[in-house]
Image (spheres, grey):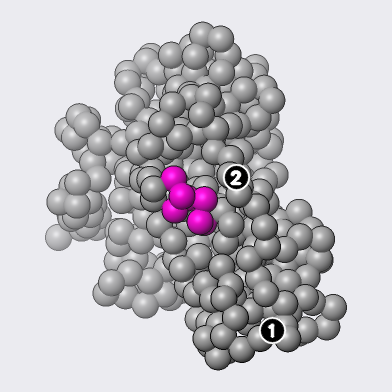
Amino acid sequence: MTASNDRDERLDMLIGRVEAKGYLPPPAEDWKRALRAVPRHQFVPDRAWVLADEAHPAHAIDKAARPDEWWEAVYLDTPIIIQADDGATDHTTGQGTASSSLSALSGVLYNFGFVDLDEGHRVLEIGTGTGYTAALTARIVGKAGEVVSVEVDAALATQAGENLAAAVPGRGAPTVIVGDGADGYAHAAPFDRVHATCSVQSIPYAWIEQCRPGGRIVTPYGEWFGHGLIAQVDVMPDGSGLGRFPGTSGYMHLRSQRPVDGHAAAWSSAGARVGQTRVNPRTIAYAPPAADLVITHLAPGVTARRPADALWLFDGSDPDCWAVATYAEFDDAFEVHQHGRRDLWDEAVEAYFQWQHFGRPGLDRFGLTVTRGGGELWIDRPGNPIMLQAAGRETTPLPAPSRAAVG
């Protein structure tokens, strides 16, 4: 078998796997043609880090040293990390925080399913990365369409441009712009679609302005607490955006909307307010996506980490503000440490029980209105905003009476 036939066979097997999982957007045959016209291997660097899947542990790949392993990894349905810590850490080691990747094909196609691309569309993509999604977009919209992709990292943009020149030569090739994706690209507006490949905490109004009425914005959406949703926002004639959350999707944050670094890595009681709660921290940490959504809006700026033994909360704008709720029981309660200008644990708990007060609604009942003044989360209908209906501290300070009721 020739190398070309081997590549084609690997690609067909990958396409078959994602089709069997139901990830191919309609019309499926158009997407199969696009996937075959944009081979995934053209967008994978010679050295990278492959995240784990059901059958393979996370591992480094090196095309020159282990070509067979490299080819196998390229056509797995799993993310491939191409940059860590904005280039400051060697991404082939698995260390640091991933800052760019070639996403798993199933995830790419899942998100595309909400974009509803058509031939001739003009598309603004936010986050070029390797250039792979831009290339697929260009194949779907055709030569009558246009794709502009904005990438904040100049080195990534340069490499993506080279990848795209090989994958989509000539007329119809995407244009790669170096800039902050939050600003969009007004020079080429208006667009029919804005498609973000990174997660936003809030939808920039520039995207609304640069999308024609009747156009659509699709982006991973997750204020820093939650695991990530898909926001599908349609642009209205009055210049507002009206959206829903049709699914879940976790992606790296738009760089200009990341939480701040510098929170303490090791916790102590020094300077912290210490209390206890009867609310199991796991209840908050692993709440359903709809509860996550309410928490992110009623406790703005809160971000979370979920190690095995605790829920860690941070103020994404203030490195001195944090909370830790431990899973180990203290009598009939759990210990909570809070530090800084906000009581983040109390805010998160209060927001969670507000979601309970609403009747535990699912994602399908929530929507988002985006205007120049910002975004408003609502339930059931626009103009019915999510608001706290009760207030008060949840955590009992220590020392506290044994078996005190808290909550």
Dot 2: few (<14), some (14–19), or many (≥20) neighbours within 10 Å? Answer: some
Judge whether 113 appears above or below 56 on screen.
Answer: above
Which quadrant: the C terminus? bottom right
Of residue 273 and residue 105, the one placed in the foreground of this image is: 273
Tell me, yes or no, whether the highlighted magenta stretch contains residue 203. no
- Mark 1 secondary-structure assignment: loop
Residue 26 placement (x, y as % from top left): 22, 31
Q: Residues within 10 Å of mark 1 (few under 14, many from 20)?
A: few
Looking at the image, residue 115 lies above or below residue 293: above
Q: Which label belongs to residue 388?
A: 2
> Would you say the magenta stretch is mainly helix, strand or loop?
helix
Q: Is residue 163 left or right of residue 224?
A: left
Q: For the residues carrying marks 2 and 1, which lies nearer the camera in this image?
A: 1
Answer yes or no: is residue 91 visible: no
**Which of pointers 2 and 1 lies earlier in the amino acid sequence?**
2
In the picture of the structure, the residue carrying the numbered disc 1 is 400
Label 2 SS: loop
Q: Quadrant of residue 77?
A: bottom left
326 over 74 or under it: above or below: below
| Residue at image coords 71%, 56% | 316
Residue 90 position, x and y percent, is 62, 70
Is residue 361 something one can see in this rendering?
yes
Task: Report the magenta residues as a range.
Answer: 352-358
Which residue type does callout 1 highlight? Ala
Residue 394 found in image quarter: bottom right
Position of the N terminus by quadrant: bottom left
Q: Which amino acid lies under the numbered mark 2 shown in the image of this protein? A: Leu
